[in-house]
Image (cartoon, rainbow, N blue to C red):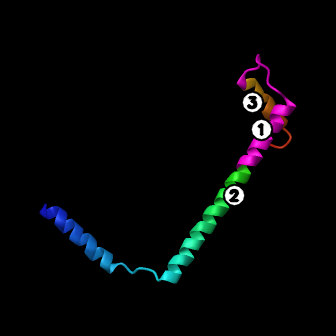
């Protein structure tokens, strides 16, 4: 029990040594974090929509049949990129 009490006393001493930011700096930092989070979320949503549309376009151009294996469909789709990507 003495160790636990000493631990929490140490935590209290450390908390008093911390240089806490002013209220204005704190809100500025909170605003920056929220802004960066919103921008990152928007970028991820746009990337997701782009990927979904790209996959949808592949599916419409060359629908896979039940006999076609996943590897065959992947190879066919990679052939579509043949002019864009140098292997």
- Magenta stretch in the rendered image: 48-70
> Between disc 3 and disc 2, whose residue precedes?
2
Q: Position of residue 24 (x, y in %)?
A: 53, 83
Q: Quadrant of residue 71?
A: top right
Q: Are marks 2 and 1 in contact (CB under 8 Å)?
A: no
In this image, 24 relative to 68: left or right?
A: left
Q: Position of residue 15 (x, y in %)?
A: 32, 75
* Residue 34 covered by magenta stretch: no
Q: Magenta span: helix, strand or loop, mainly?
A: helix
Is disc 3 surrounded by few (<14), some (14 to 19) or many (20+) residues within 10 Å? few
Picture disc at residue 42: 2
Q: Nearer the viewer, residue 58 or 79?
A: 58
Q: Would you name the residue on which mark 3 appears?
A: 74
Residue at the outermost left position: 2
Is residue 54 placed above or below 28 in the rendered structure? above
Q: Are marks 1 and 3 in contact (CB under 8 Å)?
A: no
Nearer mark to the viewer, of 1 and 3: 1
- Across and down, in percent, residue 33 comes to 57, 68
Residue positioned 23% across, 71% down in the render: 10
Q: CA distance from mark 3 to mark 2?
A: 29 Å
């Amino acid at each position: 029990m003495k160790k636990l009490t000493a631990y929490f006393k140490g935590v209290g001493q450390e908390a008093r040594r911390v240089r806490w930011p002013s209220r204005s700096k704190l809100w500025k930092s909170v605003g920056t974090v929220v802004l960066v989070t919103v921008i990152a979320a928007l970028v991820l949503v746009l990337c997701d929509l782009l990927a979904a549309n790209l996959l949808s376009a592949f599916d419409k151009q060359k629908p896979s049949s039940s006999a076609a294996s996943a590897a065959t469909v992947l190879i066919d789709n990679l052939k579509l990129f043949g002019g864009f990507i140098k292997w």
